[in-house]
Structures are given as C-alpha cells and as structure tokens.
C-alpha cells in the first residue's frame, strides 16, 4: 500500500500555469506506475497523464498533450504534473494514483491507490 497526498492546486487565469505535486509514503514508491486523473463537475473521473516506474515512459490524454508534463522524483517519493497554457475546461479536482502495472496505463481500473484530490480552477 502507498498513501498519496496531492498539493499545488489553486485558482489561475486562462493561459497560466500550475504545478501539482503528489507525495507518496512507503518504501516501494519507485516500483509503481503513477498517474494523474481529474474529475470535473458532472463528469466521470478521466485520465490525464501517467509515468512508468523509471520515468522512461509517459502517456497523455489527447486533451493535454503539449501542455502538461508528468515527471517523478523517486529519491523523494514525489510525482509532478506541470500544467501550462491552462484552459477553463481544465477546471477539475485532480487526483494522483498509483498502479502495480509496469507500464504507463491510462485505465482507471488499473490504479488501486488514490489521493484525496486537489482543486484546480481556471478562470476565463
């Protein structure tokens, strides 16, 4: 098991940037694929980005490609989501998740550990 705590959310104007962080507890963080998902009001939780255990493979939703970057620091048990050129439609609660799958999977059901989420609001 791994416990996950997100931070870095907030209110930003369209075109701005935010960096989300997800701190993980546990000694096996480096063995997990890590992902970011988001849930906007009235919508289901959707995939945003994922990174495999080594950081050598990443995967992005089409809606964020070229704007968001996922990265990880295994020495400090942290995964990041750098979000640039933010749009109002990026407004959502963002969740960090951990998976035992060895690749950067986008399937929500592949993730067994979830954080509580952090709110991101992008104003127009």
Image (cartoon, rainbow, N blue to C red):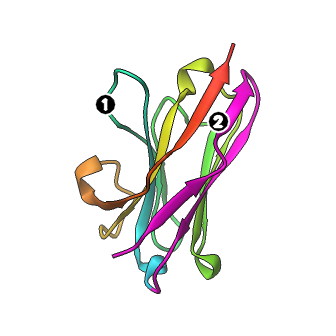
Quarter holding residue 45 = top left
Q: Position of residue 97 (x, y in %)?
A: 40, 57
Residue at (61, 28) in percent of width and height: 121
Q: Earlier in the sequence, mark 2 or mark 1?
A: 1
Q: Is residue 15 magenta?
A: yes
Asked if the residue at tag 1 contacts the one at tag 2, i.e. Cβ–Cβ closer than 8 Å, the answer is no
Label 2 SS: loop
Q: Which mark is residue 44?
A: 1
Give the side of residue 27 with respect to residue 102, left or right: right
Give the camera-side residue of 23 and 63.
23
Q: Position of residue 103 (x, y in %)?
A: 36, 64
Quarter holding residue 74 = bottom right
Residue count near mark 1 (Cα–Cα under 10 Å), binned few <14, some 14–19, many ≥20? few
Q: Is residue 120 magenta?
A: no
Residue at (34, 55) in percent of width and height: 105
Q: Position of residue 54 (x, y in %)?
A: 51, 74
Residue at (26, 57) in percent of width and height: 110
Give the side of residue 117 with respect to residue 16, left or right: left
Label 2, label 1: how far apart the Cα atoms are: 22 Å
Vertical placement of 42 versus 8: above or below?
A: above
Give the camera-side residue of 52 and 114.
114
Q: Position of residue 119 (x, y in %)?
A: 56, 37
**In the orientation shown, which residue stands out farthest toward the bottom?**
27
Vertical placement of 69 versus 91: above or below?
A: below
Quadrant where the C terminus is found in the figure: top right
**The magenta stretch spans which residues?**
1-27
Q: From the viewer's perspective, is the residue at label 2 or at label 1 nearer?
A: 1
Quadrant where the N terminus is found in the figure: bottom left
What residue is shown with label 2?
67
**In the orientation shown, which residue stands out farthest toward the front?**
116
Vertical placement of 45 versus 72: above or below?
A: above
Label 1 SS: loop
């Amino acid at each position: 098991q791994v416990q996950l705590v997100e931070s870095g959310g907030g209110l930003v104007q369209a075109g701005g940037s935010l960096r989300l962080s997800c701190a993980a507890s546990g000694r096996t963080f480096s063995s997990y694929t890590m992902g970011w998902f988001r849930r906007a009001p009235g919508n289901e939780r959707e995939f945003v980005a994922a990174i495999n255990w080594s950081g050598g493979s990443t995967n992005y939703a089409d809606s964020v490609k070229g704007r968001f970057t996922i990265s990880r620091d295994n020495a400090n048990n942290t995964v990041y989501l750098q979000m640039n050129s933010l749009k109002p439609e990026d407004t959502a609660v963002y969740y960090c998740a951990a998976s035992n799958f060895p690749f950067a999977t986008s399937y929500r059901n592949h993730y067994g550990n979830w954080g509580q989420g952090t709110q991101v609001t992008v104003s127009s």
